[in-house]
Amino acid sequence: MTGRPVDIEIVPRAHAILSASSAERWLTCTPSARIEEALADEESAYATDGTAAHAFSELRLRYKLGQTSKAEYVAAYEAAKTLFAEAIEAWEASDWDAINSYVEYVLDEAKRLDAEVHIEQRVDYSRYAEGGFGTSDALLIGRKQGIVKSIDLKFGKGVPVDAKDNAQAKLYALGGVLMFDPTLAGQFPTIEWAIHQPRLNYVGTDTTSFDALIAWAEDVVKPAARLAWEGKGVKVPSEKACRFCKARATCRERAAENVNVARRDFVGDPDLRFDAKKLDEHLMGMDEVARILPQLDEWMAWARALQEYALSSVRDRGQTIEGYKLVRGRTTRQWNPSADVVAELRAAGVDDSVIYEDPKPPAVRSVAQMEKKLGKAQFIEKAQPLVVQSQGTPTLVSETDPRPAIDAAAEARKAFEG
């Protein structure tokens, strides 16, 4: 059930232009592969969170499988804690439980299939997609039962990922088949894949035959990959393809689709004269509402992406957008994290019934609640020294907003220079 022991390196994964992780994009919107290649990589707390989860999962699995010694596991675990300190600082017990849930699932499946387990296994499907490769989180090879199974860990808790006909997971499985059955003789007639999203309590599986998988690779993957590699084809905006695309905010086709769909489908005769008896000619009916409702999530997702892009362009890259400026958002008051708030309030003569809010277990009242409970004069005297005021988060607003504009880049340079 164990694979060959290997050295553990906690490093970023390499990504192909036609990667498995971006397959939902380049299989449907083939030019997106080259467009994304030309754009800078994105860094996000969500991505770091996922990278950390994969690292700890790998360490745990390799130790459980006997691929590393306890000493190696402890040393690598401590290194990972240091490397991902910022990400795991916000983790709760449930997040660590989620990692254990994934680990146990892999071990249970390996036992069920009496399979070899290959952790963080690089797989190659370049015979169907130029330069195509990916990294399967766990690749199970059940030789006795003739099964190849790829398991993919998704640590996000915002967007559910469905295993049904999942292109990324299928490509991992395809690469796994090609690793161990390069002659395409079909010694693994059953192909399985699973998506494990533990923080959403989701485990989804799907299966296909060896012949069906190869047919998909020939008929779907190969022609789409050829167009994608050459940067050709038609741009096809869709909820799945655009969700994580680096061009999702500024893609012209996506903008045109979202801006024009309502205009195309719902604009009536501009010269229509109002007649109260024909009100239904001016207002949407339920059939039209039914047509537009499915579009709303995509429109709002695109709008949020565009807003985030505009903000980061001005805030982080010093660009300007006509008619807009960067200002400080609302400041907030909080207790000084370096102060022993309870002890100092008690020393100032504040009773515990005022310090703590009900119900139990006791929690220190917020600054606003404390001010209301004590009254302004008593608050200033006894609690104000323990309060710090956070700087408002930069936000992009219309230039007509009365708040003064700020230069976030200049502020950052000043802070760095001391």
Image (cartoon, helix red, strand yellow):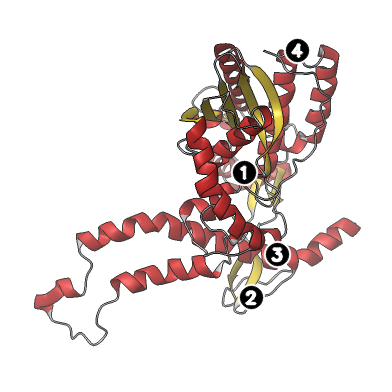
Identify the residue at horizontal 49%, vertical 25% (top origin).
359
In contact (CB < 8 Å): disc 2 and disc 4: no
Q: Which residue is mark 3?
A: 315
Mark 3 vs 4, N-terminal side: 4
Mark 2 vs 1, N-terminal side: 1
Residue kind at label 1, given as amino acid type: Ala
> Label 2 vs label 4: CA separation?
56 Å
In what quadrant of the picture does the C terminus appear? bottom right
> Label 2 vs label 1: CA separation?
36 Å
- In the visual, does 19 lie left or right of 66? left
Which element carries disc 4, helix, strand or loop? Answer: loop
Q: Is residue 395 above or below residue 174?
A: below
Q: x, y percentage for residue 404?
A: 67, 72
Q: x, y percentage for residue 410?
A: 81, 66
Residue kind at label 3, given as amino acid type: Arg
Q: Which mark is residue 71?
A: none
> Label 3 vs label 4: CA separation?
48 Å
Numbered disc in front, either 1 or 3 = 1
Residue 362 in view: no
Q: Which residue is mark 1?
A: 20
Name the one closer to the observer, 343 or 46: 46
- Which class describes the residues within 10 Å of circle 1: few (<14), some (14-19), or many (20+)? many
Residue kind at label 4, given as amino acid type: Gly
